Image (spheres, coloured by chain):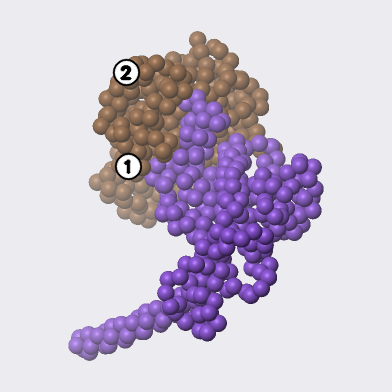
Amino acid sequence: MQDKTYSSYKQLEQKSKYTNMFLRWFLYFVLVIFALYFIFPLYVMVVTSLKTMEEIRQGTLLTWPSGLNFDSWLVAWGGRGYGAGDTFLKPYFWNSIKMVVPAVFFSTFIGAMAGYVLTKWRFKGDKWVFLFLLFGCFIPYQAILLPMARTLGVLGISNSVIGLVLVHTVYGIPFTTLFFRNFYVSIPSELVKAARIDGAGFFKIFFKILLPVSTPIIVVTIIWQFTQIWNDFLFGSTFSFGEAAPIQVALNNMVLSSTSVKEYNVDMASAIIAGIPTLIVYVLAGKYFIRGLTSGAVKG
Amino acid sequence: MKTLKIEELSKNFGSTEVLRKINLEIDEGNFLVLLGPSGCGKSTLLNIIAGLETINEGNVHIDDYNVSKVEPKDRNIAMVFQSYALYPSMNVRENMIFGLKQAKVSKEKIEEQLEKVSKFLQVDALLERKPSQLSGGQRQRVAIGRALVREPRIFLFDEPLSNLDAKLRVEMRREIKKLHQQLKTTVVYVTHDQTEAMSLGTNIAIMNHGVIQQNDTPENIYNKPSNTFVADFIGSPSMNLIKGNLKESSNKVSFVTHGSNIEIPINGYDFKKKSNLDNKEVFFGIRPEHIFFKKSNEEDFEINLRADLSEYIGHEQIMTFNFENQEVLAKFPSTVKIDLSKNTKLFFDLTQISLFDAKTEERI
């Protein structure tokens, strides 16, 4: 009796071992398939950007380039060196930087302040304010184009980087406020009470107590805002043209306005250049994306 | 001069009335405990004393000065919170001196205070640590230290021990008691734990539904509860409240339950007003610990009750008896043997009873 039970347990153990092994391998298989699927376009882009036009015409999409040929990257970044009709990314890249840095900074800062007020300095009707701000998240971009164009015109900053900074800041505030509000809700209000008794004022509490523990949400907000603003095409193409255009608009112009042959290698290189900053932000900020910086400090 | 005086204070959040006509006074050096079930308004009252909540009606005086519209930092108070509320980004030193720095106290004075307090609370070895690197008890000590360095007139404690585990809670309770004995600062302490309230307070104010039910010494709260709420809230298990009527004949008063012929004489009872007692519907209150298995004094009333249930808890046992279909609980040493479902001879200590009007639920 005893032996029989023992052997049947052995069998069950074997069986579950095989099942688990099969499931594990199946999981890896699926993951590899998906990974290949996602990496494929990037592969094509990188490979194509390193080929000469000759190679592109003769080979297939997947053919390996003959060597590391960065010519098309140089062309994409700095142009060919002749005058009219030569569009290249360098000036627009800096336009984008000049737009994205202040826009991310201001929208994050204002969002943090708004979130702080909405959670720690409650006032009559604060729920309504928050509700209206939330509306901002759901209003489609297209709906605000005309009023915004008019506003920029009245302010005299249409077709300028400053105008784009304003647009992106305003449009970003609903999102950043939402992020910070939800984060600050989880921070006990007793911290603010303690600081008030200690004699700290509105700004001191914000800068000395709340902001130092906000790193995780600041990183999240920066990643979100940077990606949104850097990758934006609609606002950029609507509110700016020519010299003041951000990189995504320039990329579009460059790819669409080639007069003679479609230079796939230059197009691919440009597209990668336009995408690099967001990648950098993810890689750099991801490191600081540590959760629970406040855990333990506030609750036991 | 009263260190703290609260007059006719009312507070509501929208249409919800949180505090209703609160009157309180504390003398210098006293330890007042605000005790009550959750939602009774005790924390709100504490926040109002601190100046963290506004007042709808009434006034708060500290040292005879009306502080109702004074900022928290200028009220000369310090507060210890349930969640400690230590600033997570600052180390222990910065946490403790933050208030003094805000008040622009001189560097030498700050260092002096910090050294004194951190030695006193034995946190001087932890000064460079962040709150997240401290244990619960250490955090609690730092939180108290942050309050101490300011040398306030009044200490406010908002359930400071409820986040600690049972063992640590008892230790910290004793430390707070010692602290108060040494410093003799006035304290207002909020808790829902009656043991904490009883052991710490020189005065206890029991609150329910935004009203102070009784404000008295721990002894009076325990021995002479002013209404059935207080009687029921204090003590574990709580006081037995047996429903029945009073009977008065030829200047002798006794208590009878419905459908019973047992008359409990209550001649020694200290009535507030000795009139209209005959046939009055009352609750006869006796604590489980005042029911004895052996006669304790001459006045004891002997009664035979059936034992229904026994709860053994180590050093003692709680027995449930049937008294004319009303449950009566009694506490005995666990060495006493009592048979269930049998009548047992018991003794009520009549010097310790309380009587309440059944309608108003007030002590009579």
- Residue extending farthest left: A3
Q: CA distance from mark 1 to mark 2?
A: 25 Å
Q: Nearer the viewer, residue A93 or B252?
A: A93
Residue of label 2: B112
Mark 2 Cα-neighbour bin, 10 Å: few <14, some 14–19, many ≥20: few
Q: Amino acid at mark 2?
A: Glu
Mark 1 Cα-neighbour bin, 10 Å: few <14, some 14–19, many ≥20: few
- The chain identifier of the residue carrying mark 1 reads B
Residue at the image point whose x is 46% and y is 53% from the top: A285
Q: Position of residue A13 (x, y in %)?
A: 28, 83
Sequence-first tag of 1 and 2: 2
Q: Is residue B125 above or below residue B136?
A: above
Residue at the image point whose x is 47% and y is 36% from the top: A209
Q: Position of residue B352 (x, y in %)?
A: 41, 30
The answer to whether the residue labelled 1 contacts the one labelled 2, judged by CB atoms less than 8 Å apart, is no
Residue of label 1: B133
Residue at the image point whose x is 36% and y is 34% from the top: B91
Q: Amino acid at mark 1?
A: Gln
Q: Is label 2 in a helix, a strand or a loop?
A: helix
Q: Which chain is brown?
A: B
Q: Nearer the viewer, residue A17 or A148?
A: A148
Q: Is residue A124 visible?
A: yes
Residue at the image point whose x is 44% and y is 15% from the top: B28
The quadrant in which residue A139 appears is bottom right
Q: Nearer the viewer, residue A190 or A207?
A: A207
Q: Is label 1 in a helix, a strand or a loop?
A: helix
Q: Colour of chain A?
A: purple
The quadrant in which residue B10 appears is top right
